[in-house]
Amino acid sequence: MGKKREERAKGHSPAGSGCNLDGGYTSPIKSFQDISAETLKNTLLSSRYVQLLLSLTVIGLILRFFNLGYNSLWLDEASTLTFASMSLPGIWEATTGGEFNPPLFYWTEHIMLLFGNSEVILRFVPALLGVLTIPLVYVIGKEFYDRNVGIIAAAAVTFSPFLIFYSQEARAYSMGLFLIVASLVFFLKALKTNRISHWILFGSLSALAFWSHFYTLVITGSLVLYAFTVKISEFKKDIVSCKPLVLAGATFILLSLPLIVVTVELFAKRTASAPTFGIEGAGIIIETFRQLSGFSEIVMYLFLLLFVIGIVQAFLTERNKGIFLVALTFLPFAISWFLSYRIPMMPRYLIILAPFFFIGIAMAYKPIYNLARSRWVVYGFMAMLVLLSVTTPFFMSYYSTYSKEDWRNFSKQVSQITTRGDLVVVAPGYIYQPFDYYYSNSTDGTYEFRADNGETLESLRLQKGNNSMFVIMTSDISSANPGGDAVAWINQHTQLISQNTGIYLFKVS
């Protein structure tokens, strides 16, 4: 043990192969057959990488489960509850009927409803998958370059405000990211070994990712294109060598075929008219980088600098590694730029870029290590990324300030303001979902209606008689009523009496 500590203190392995936090220690666990209580204990006590990864995973668990029910359910999360409350066949019918989200996450939430429908229950699976993503990113970094890249990237994922935020949201983003990261593990292994089992696992996990979120297809397609590009010379020499990759594609298509048919129909429907919300053009790229960088422009510039350095280092190490990082960043952004003019595009759809972004940033440790030749470069790099993340304004206020619409307290305000017989109108109509999760018009003795335009609002005003009429409105009205007559009606016939985190309560004059 004394010799091992001495080797670690030197900051490199005995063979001088580079920065090795474990010094001369080699884990006895090489396969599942090697796992036992003794080998696990030995590895845990001796491997700095295992100790760091375990610590990061525990910290990630705390950050993702702490105050999990603090924020109210907002519109999209309440929509999750609406679909999850359907039967399993009913959820699939909703997808084929026009719901622009695949059913896997809803099916999972349907099962979770057996334990209740609280905010914590609905967000439990995304939080858990967010935690499990941390060790998988370590494996990706290790497979892509070395264990140092893996542990640095894992640290970035652990403390990422962007990833923490979406791990605490009852939507499919965390699930889609987890499955893409899992598929990426086997993709990198398959590139090295060309084993059929690795390629089939890549295809299977990519299919599951597609069943959780449509946009994961962008990453899967980019990965397949990259694999074909780097192996094309090999395929030309021996056409049979492409069999594993073909099997991966066949596996994906076979498992996804019903959803592929639905996707084509939904895409045609979605692109039939111009998007009424979202970010277009170069804006989606800039905003995605900003949010990936903890919602901070300053951190974004620093992260982008490190990312570029990491890409250069990847090219210097191996040309294909550099191409990989560039391709898996450029292609999804190029596709998103184009699609942003056809369908609503938001940075959260591009959460699947996180592993490539953080792996690229982690690669930047290597040129610094080449100058300093000290293992403290790795620790310092991790500390820097953690510090940049936790000192962002978003992170510092995240657990004490509402980051979503506060429907919980807003519904209490409505109950206090209204009296029996009053009319309560939600506009647009679909925001009844988060509102009704906290508010009961039967308990309050009011009449609740839904309106999407000025004509409906005027009709209700004429019917209210001597009762008061209140209108609840959010910015979603601009998407539901792009013509603007609902807002014009509000300006003409109401006065604002209350607002809370982007929710407005108007009283009809």
Image (cartoon, helix red, strand yellow):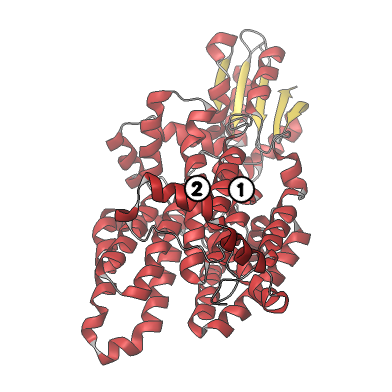
In this view, the residue in front, 37 or 2, is: 2
**Is 23 left, or right, of 232 in this rendering?**
right
Disc 1: which residue: 482
Quarter holding the C terminus is top right
Q: Residue furthest bottom?
A: 237
**Is 317 left, or right, of 97 in this rendering?**
right
Location of residue 324 in the rendering, given as x and y in whole percent from the top left corner: 50, 76
Location of residue 317 in the rendering, given as x and y in whole percent from the top left corner: 55, 82
Q: What residue is drawn where x is 38% and y is 72%?
A: 224
Local SS, label 2: helix
Location of residue 326 in the rendering, given as x and y in whole percent from the top left corner: 55, 76
In this view, the residue in front, 360 or 174, is: 360
**Is 145 left, or right, of 198 in this rendering?**
right
In this view, the residue in front, 393 or 170, is: 393
Q: For residue 192, say whether it is visible.
A: yes
Q: Residue furthest left?
A: 240
Earlier-in-chain disc, 1 versus 2: 2
Q: Nearer the viewer, mark 1 or mark 2?
A: 2
> Which mark identifies residue 174?
2
Local SS, label 1: loop
